[in-house]
Amino acid sequence: MERIFDKKKVAACIAKSKYHSILSTMDIDFYLINYEKGEFVSSPFQNELLFQIVEQGSINIYIIRDDGTRYALSNGTTDYFLGDMDIFYPRSGDVYAEAAERLTCIAFSIEKHRETLLSNSGFLELICNSLSAKIGTITTIDAAPSSLSERVMSYMKYKCDHGTLKGIEQAAFHLHCSARQLQRILNQREADGSVKKIGKGTYKLCETEWTIHQTA
């Protein structure tokens, strides 16, 4: 991830934006963020609340449930908003946005500019249109087909602190499987080098699997 504060580059990007007429009237500290493919653009691990507008590239937005099941929400491309829900509601602990390719976004801090955002009718109209479209998409989503092995890996990566699963019985309950099934999967994953046993009933994702890119 690379943040760019060069005013000329930021102004040039805003000038090309579909939302130029609104953004150019707002007294906000805009900057640009470049992401590499696979980096998280937004996630529950992000410390800073950012509003971002995709200007180049594309993103995959998905939900990870407590049982490791992955639900695809949408594929965002140019002009897609990220952070619109965060203006009004507490951030969801389940939603992730990942760069599907090299990505450039216009960005700014929500917390720093919240009052400015809420007092701008033109900006709020854009947000209403964005949220309406997202709600329509959410009503039609289905869980992406996944094996128990895939769900175990997602559960460890997204739901376990530092990628560490502690307690076979408790994890099996969340994954809707038996402790024996989970143990078999963990043994297989340990054999192929994906996880490492670090204690009784405790397994940790190996470094190649445990890669989380944060935006802050």
Image (cartoon, grey):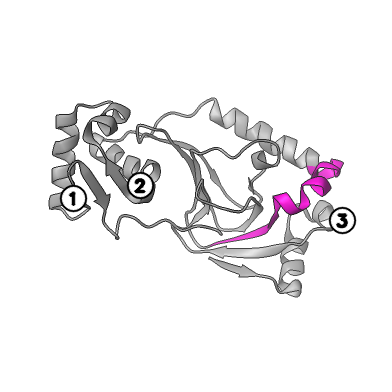
Q: Earlier in the sequence, mark 1 or mark 3?
A: 3
Figure check: 128 above or below 108: above
Foreground residue, 153 or 90?
90
Q: Label 1 to label 2, Cα distance in Å?
A: 15 Å
Q: Measured from the top left, where is residue 153 in percent x and y?
A: 29, 44
Q: Earlier in the sequence, mark 3 or mark 2?
A: 3
Q: Label 1 to label 3, Cα distance in Å?
A: 56 Å
What residue range appears in magenta?
103-123
User: Are the residues flagged by discs 1 and 3 in contact, CB closer than 8 Å?
Assistant: no
Q: Measured from the top left, where is residue 15 in percent x and y?
A: 78, 63
Residue marked by disc 3: 25
In magenta stretch: residue 194:
no
Number of the label disc, if any, that sits on residue 197: 1
Q: Measured from the top left, where is residue 115 in percent x and y?
A: 82, 46
Number of the label disc, if any, that sits on residue 157: 2
Tell me the amino acid under the disc marked 1: Lys
